[in-house]
Image (cartoon, helix red, strand yellow):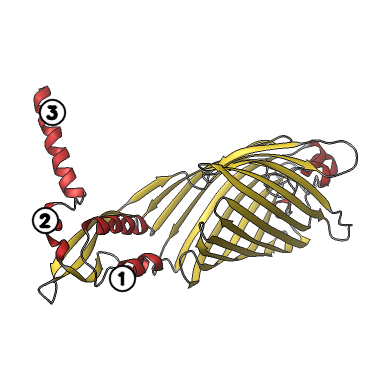
Amino acid sequence: MVAAVFVAGFLFGLFSARAFSWNPGDDTNVNSRYTVESVEITGASEARLSRGLREELGRYVGQRFSPEAFARLSGRVRDELKARLVSPKLLKGTSPESVRVVLDVMGRRVNVSAAQSRLAWHTRQGWTGDLVLTVEERDRQRLNLGVFADGDTFTERSSGAKAGYSRSLFQGRIRPGFSVSTAHAQYDSRTLSAAGTDELYRNVDSFQPTVTFVPWRGGDGEELTVDVGMRLQRFALLSPEANRNVASHALVNTLRYRRVRGDVENGRTVWNGLFALANGVGGDYSFARQELRGGVEYQRGVSRLTVDLTGGALRGEAPFTERFAAGNSLLLRGWNKFEIAPLGGTRLVASSVEYGRSLKGKLEASAFVDSGSIWNRGGTAVARTSVGCGLRTRDGFFFYMAFPLRDGRVEPMVMTGATF
């Protein structure tokens, strides 16, 4: 019985190795004397490949056939197209000393990952966790399922569950989808004492259908995207009146831009920009919210310099979730958000300058200066600055110690965690 199982396993392994891998061995080495006449993609659209990979495939036209090179290129095509298998095939060319290389893309690959997840700890805010499980079928369909307990991003601690679905059409140029979530809110004592009777909420349910358009794609890493959608929310208010519910409906539009130029050895520059609009329509609230983010990261060799800017304005009567927060692990690091703005703010201006230097492997030492202000319309903006230093890695781990610059006591804030 054991021998039979062993033989069956050996045969299955032998078959799998022959069927699902390409070994540039005996037959292909013979063909290395031929010239590549053309490189073709079958089973998928070549337009789905990045410009850099398409150009690299084109550079092999007119050169001697290399089994090792095309084995490597097949792996890159498989990864970019998220295919199960890419099988290189050789066909006769139009001349006796030439061959056509056909990369046959087969099957769809389903990826399951926890990308977009985050775990963090803050001296004044405790733990924050956001676990997202993503199931993706190539670039066509994506399903997200997650749970979260976020005490960092907003003024309140929001805990609950969320899900989302999107589908890619026309080579990813159009991506319709939707997201749903349900959350329960908890508040710091300073927030509770500063809030009015009808400002805070106990629970919120959200539904947001969205369509993403990609009107522009340039070189590798360059893309302009536009999100158009509507956010429908129902709040159970934290008020003496039992079961008091209100609704908030808003049109949401977001413009994003990303551009990457160069390489790390000679100098790589990454530009990121975001402009988000939300306008209340119907429901119990009428408001307009604008948020602008921009940043540039320059890295050369072991050195990295990052500059980020954030600004926002909120007008009208809006639900508590639309307010801005600062004094956390994202903005004005080192300050306590419950001390400077226990109810958040309707105006925000913040900046961050960070310099990092690689130590060994993926580890990097960094230092930063954060400055900015958060206030309410009609109030006075108070400029605040903090400095800090810490360690981080390229795969998402960070450990920072930050100090607010002010007269009197010194209270360092410790922030640590990872994104993955």
- Asked if one can make out residue 195 in the rendered structure from this viewpoint, the answer is no
Q: Secondary structure at mark 3?
A: helix
Tag 2: residue type? Answer: Asp
How much space separates mark 2 and mark 3, taking CA atoms? 30 Å
Tag 3: residue type? Answer: Phe
Which residue is the site of mark 2? Answer: 27
Q: Residues within 10 Å of mark 3 (few under 14, many from 20)?
A: few
Q: Determine the residue positioned at 11% across, 33% down.
A: 8
Q: Residues within 10 Å of mark 2 (few under 14, many from 20)?
A: few
| 247 vs 152: above or below | below
Which residue is the site of mark 3? Answer: 6
How much space separates mark 1 and mark 3, taking CA atoms? 45 Å
Q: Nearer the viewer, residue 407 or 286?
A: 407
Q: Nearer the viewer, residue 371 or 70?
A: 70
Earlier in the chain: of badge 2 and badge 3, it is: 3
| 235 vs 215: above or below | above
Q: Secondary structure at mark 1?
A: helix
Q: Determine the residue positioned at 68% across, 43% down.
A: 152
Tag 1: residue type? Answer: Gly
Earlier in the chain: of badge 1 and badge 3, it is: 3
Q: Residue furthest top?
A: 1
Q: Determine the residue positioned at 50% across, 67% down.
A: 222
Which residue is the site of mark 1? Answer: 58
Name the spot of residue 410 as percent of width and height, x first. 83, 36
Q: Nearer the viewer, residue 328 or 55?
A: 55
Name the spot of residue 81 as percent of width and height, x first. 34, 59
Q: Are marks 1 and 3 in contact (CB under 8 Å)?
A: no
